[in-house]
Amino acid sequence: MTSQRDTHLGGLLQELPVREHGPGYWAAVMAAAEPELRRHRAGAADSEGADRPAAHDATPLLRRRKAMWMAAAAVAAAAVLAVVVLAGLPGADRGSVVLGPQPATAAEAIRYALGALDDAQGLEGTLYIGKVRDGAFSAGDKVTFLCARNGSYRITTKTLGKDALLPLPGYVETVAYDARTRVAQGSFDYGEQGFRSEVTAQDPATGQDVITTTITRYVFTETHDVAPGPPDARVFVGSGEFPIWQVRAYLRTMLGDPHIRFTTGELNGRAVWTLRAEAFSAGPAEAAAKGRSVTVIIDADTRLPLRVGGFRGRYELRVDSAALTQAPPASEFTLEKPPAEETQEQSAPSLIDESMRFPALPLSDPAAMTKAVDGIPAFPAWLPRGFELQEGASQAHGSVSLPRSLGGGSIPGTIVSLAYRRGFDAAYVSVRPEPRLTGVSTIGPSGEGEPEIRVDTSDPFIGDVSPWDRAQWRRHTTDVRLTAGAFEGATAHVIVDPGYWPHLWVKKDGWVATVAGDLTREEMVRIAESLGPWSGQAAE
Amino acid sequence: MLLQVVHRGRSLAPTLVPSVTPPPGGTGLGDEVAPGVVAAASEGDARAFETILRHYDRRLRVIADRILDDRQAMDDALQEVAIKALRGLPSFRGDAPLGAWLCRIATTTCLDHLRRRRPEDPTAPDELPAARSALQQDPADALDDRERLLAALRTLPPGHRAAIVLVDQFGYDYRTAAETLGVPVGTAASRVASARARLRALLAAGEEVER
């Protein structure tokens, strides 16, 4: 039989890798097979001369086989059961085969969706953001993304049309962050219109200002020693604006809402979970649109979002493809510089003062750590299970000015910024001296009959929020009096708003602390209540 | 179909494609399940049916992966294979080994899947130029043997890929391969010969580039 075989080539072919099935494959197959199996069973029961002994003979072999693959199939088997139970539901036939665990409530669905990345090393895909006009989707932005478990990412946003979030014709923006090297890059292509910049200099001969205008197609930025999180906005903002993460923020916000409507169904042949919130605040960009509904459609198989209606208010988000990958190589998170002759290169975003560099903390050197952060109440003794300290950075240049976007004022001492990770989930803790020039910003009524709103601009997150939007921000703030830790007795302000990363801030004794990230309100409070100086020990 | 919501489940190729090394024993050819299991499955015993699928799973994955070269497509096709096999089990007479019978279903199903792919579908086999260039890339990025062979395989027509897998990897004779492919024996032999020649040439070219 093998005489016609090329054994050398056959041997090479034999060594080639073969793809494994995707998650939930066996559950899907068995669910799809169940109707046919039922027909077979019915046929066998109707047949008088059925081969009963053969079925019984199979049992010992089945047991042996079962012993061989039981461990690997245990999870799939559980999923099969869940699927079989649901097999009678409308839309659960072929084409909408339900693969994973099946939620019965909105809260369960949200938790499953938030856990979609628990075991992933990388996430890549493409999505579109646009508007629905006369029933047809008009794409404004195309976003391609690649994210790694360690916090690295590369996100490209391309303007497609007038329904873009930033409707600049021909604009393409790529931002990247390499968590390994803590280098952030941005490459901005302004298309044929170019990027106009003006430099004013004094003519030594005449003493008059001379304005030089240059137009380049590209702007390229690269910054080193980026802090892993607040108060440095560079990385935080980049990932915080990533749509998939924003959808996760939506889901977290929905988690606390008992009025979310949850349904199962089908979209383009895929089984989906639909979560709909009425009167949902769609974020500060749409302050006037409070009450707008938001619909998040989750793929029941991948548990990743497929579509979001009411995204950032009037937009719709559509995921074209999303896939979990193995760990992407680090080279994916370094951008190629555009042609030098067409590029204006900026060593750091103009938003941030050059001196705002955050060298890494010597986390593995207890003595050096004690010296670097002595007495600063920046270290939580408690974190949700699974979170581990991944990055730590500090800035200790003495008194430096903070940009207005970070609340303004000056900082007299050390800032500590810490990033804890649990897979793709991140928790950020920062402590900085209270800026000297912060205060209370008064905002006029945002609607008829509404009171004036006062916002304390000590919140390091509020710097980038327009005064108009701050009113809504304040409405989403819950004040909690902390009962333990270095900030005991102080009032913490917890902001859970779908337009922002959930965060908490509190100030006491000249320090401002923040806790932010993929956390619930309760978790943020508990972390804040465990803050204290460096003890040389990891959090519980 | 730019805006259609589709999860294709594609990975970063080639370095990030989930893969496993074949286990000892290779495809498990010649190792057939007991007739009693087949009988039980044909009577609707879910455990027996799943046992059959898992028993031949690697062999079927080899066929589907080589022909379709896409995990999502592979899973879709093999799910269809499972249902077709289940429907056909009661009439399966055992004239040929069950594994060969399943492989035939898998091969024809995967080739059908490939034909059904729309031209604009990015997972269609229009990646051949990329595969060719992968073979001719800079020596600094030299591919290892397996990657080179994978890249070379991608340059073959799907029917040729299936033929060489059946004959050279699975050890089928031309007649069995022809039956599996649903083509005359002469066509099967011709495809195998053509595939071998092309693979050898491409592999040699790749080595040449590396030197």
Image (cartoon, rainbow, N blue to C red):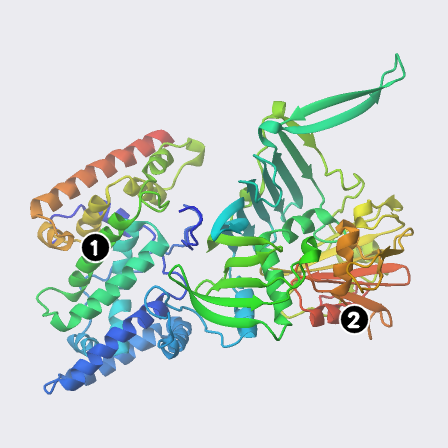
Q: As shown in the figure, which amino acid type bears the numbered disc 2?
A: Glu
Residue A72 image position (x, y, % from top left): 39, 70
Residue B116 image position (x, y, % from top left): 26, 50
Q: Where B78 sits versus A241, above or below?
A: below
The secondary element bearing badge 1 is classed as helix
Residue A122 image position (x, y, % from top left): 52, 54
Check contact, mark 1 vs mark 2: CB within 8 A: no
Q: Is residue B115 left or right of residue A86?
A: left
Query: Is there any visible trace of residue A386 in the rendered image?
Result: no
Q: As shown in the figure, which amino acid type bears the numbered disc 1?
A: Thr
Given residues A317 and B205, the one toward you in this image is: A317
- Quarter of the image with the C terminus of chain A is bottom right
Q: Is residue A490 left or right of residue B88?
A: right
- Quarter of the image with the N terminus of chain A is bottom left
Q: Is residue B42 left or right of residue A137?
A: left
The secondary element bearing badge 2 is classed as loop
- Chain letter of the residue carrying label 2: A
Given residues A363 and A71, the one toward you in this image is: A71
List the residue tagged with mark 2.
A529
Q: How many marks?
A: 2
- Chain letter of the residue carrying label 1: B
10 Å neighbourhood of mark 2: few (<14), some, or many (≥20)?
Answer: many
List the residue tagged with mark 1.
B107
Residues at marks 1 and 2 on the same chain: no
